[in-house]
Image (cartoon, helix red, strand yellow):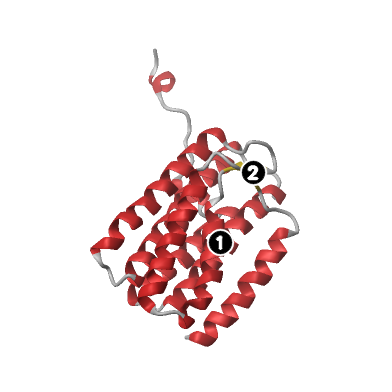
């Protein structure tokens, strides 16, 4: 057997995928999520919400762009799927866990909830990576990005409720959502015109939270 026969098939360079437009959108979402985490740690919760809302918007955008692009290779599609899933862990798992911890002033009682949020996110995404959708329009369990959409709306009322009481509400809300994430229920995959609804929702809440800064 010659040396040529024993060589591995040609593998593209890692950074060659960074210029793929859907992956650029995914990485932009990661940047937004990181900014959200940064501001959550600092206790600037309005700025944190703006960051993670845009992370959701970019998460939806990368899929739309990927479906409309022509000529993408199987490698690009596979890489994009893996990248999107890993970024989802940060945006929809790590972010809400840190947000909960920071809002709870890093009290140890909030640690179990933070762990469960990240663990549930990892379990859900791993399951989805194997089994995918039930059909083209249906998820099993509540998709993780919905957690952020709901959290951003509920947090608008934070200023009207005592901090301790709202921290309990926030804790309970995130625990209820993770149960729905893992529950064997059928939920709709929002697509098409729903992207424009999300865009409008994100812009409106960005303005509202921006006024709170």
Residue drawn at the location 27% of the way across and 68% of the way down = 106
Task: Give the CA separation, mark 2 to mark 1.
Answer: 23 Å
For label 2, the residue is 72
Of labels 2 and 1, earlier in sequence is 1
Residue drawn at the location 59% of the way across and 76% of the way down = 205
Image quarter of the N terminus: top left
Picture quadrant where residue 171 is located: bottom left
For label 1, the residue is 56
* Left or right of 11 on screen, residue 186: right
* Left or right of 128 on screen, residue 120: left
Q: Residue furthest left?
A: 108
Looking at the image, can residue 205 be seen? yes
Picture quadrant where residue 204 is located: bottom right
Instruction: Give percent across and percent down for residue 201.
Output: 65, 70
Looking at the image, can residue 34 be seen? no
Instruction: Give percent across and percent down for residue 6.
Output: 40, 20
Q: Nearer the viewer, residue 38 or 78?
A: 38
Circle nearer the viewer, 2 or 1: 1
On screen, residue 183 above or below 114: above
Local secondary structure at mark 1: helix
Residue drawn at the location 46% of the way across and 51% of the way down = 178
């Amino acid at each position: 057997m010659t040396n040529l026969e024993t060589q591995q098939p040609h593998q593209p360079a890692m950074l060659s995928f960074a210029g793929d437009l859907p992956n650029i959108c995914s990485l932009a979402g990661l940047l937004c999520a990181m900014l959200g985490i940064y501001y959550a740690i600092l206790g600037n919760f309005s700025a944190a919400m703006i960051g993670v809302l845009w992370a959701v918007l970019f998460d939806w955008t990368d899929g739309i762009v990927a479906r409309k692009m022509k000529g993408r290779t199987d490698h690009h599609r596979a890489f994009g799927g893996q990248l999107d899933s890993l970024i989802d862990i940060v945006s929809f798992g790590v972010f809400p866990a840190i947000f909960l911890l920071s809002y709870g002033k890093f009290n140890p009682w909030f640690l179990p909830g933070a762990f469960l949020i990240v663990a549930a996110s990892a379990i859900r995404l791993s399951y989805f990576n194997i089994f995918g959708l039930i059909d083209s329009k249906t998820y099993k369990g509540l998709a993780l990005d919905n957690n952020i959409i709901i959290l951003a709306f509920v947090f608008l009322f934070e200023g009207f409720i005592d901090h301790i009481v709202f921290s309990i509400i926030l804790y309970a809300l995130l625990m209820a959502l993770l149960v729905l994430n893992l529950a064997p229920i059928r939920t709709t995959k929002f697509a098409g015109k729903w992207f424009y609804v999300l865009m409008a929702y994100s812009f409106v809440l960005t303005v509202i939270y921006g006024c709170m800064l």
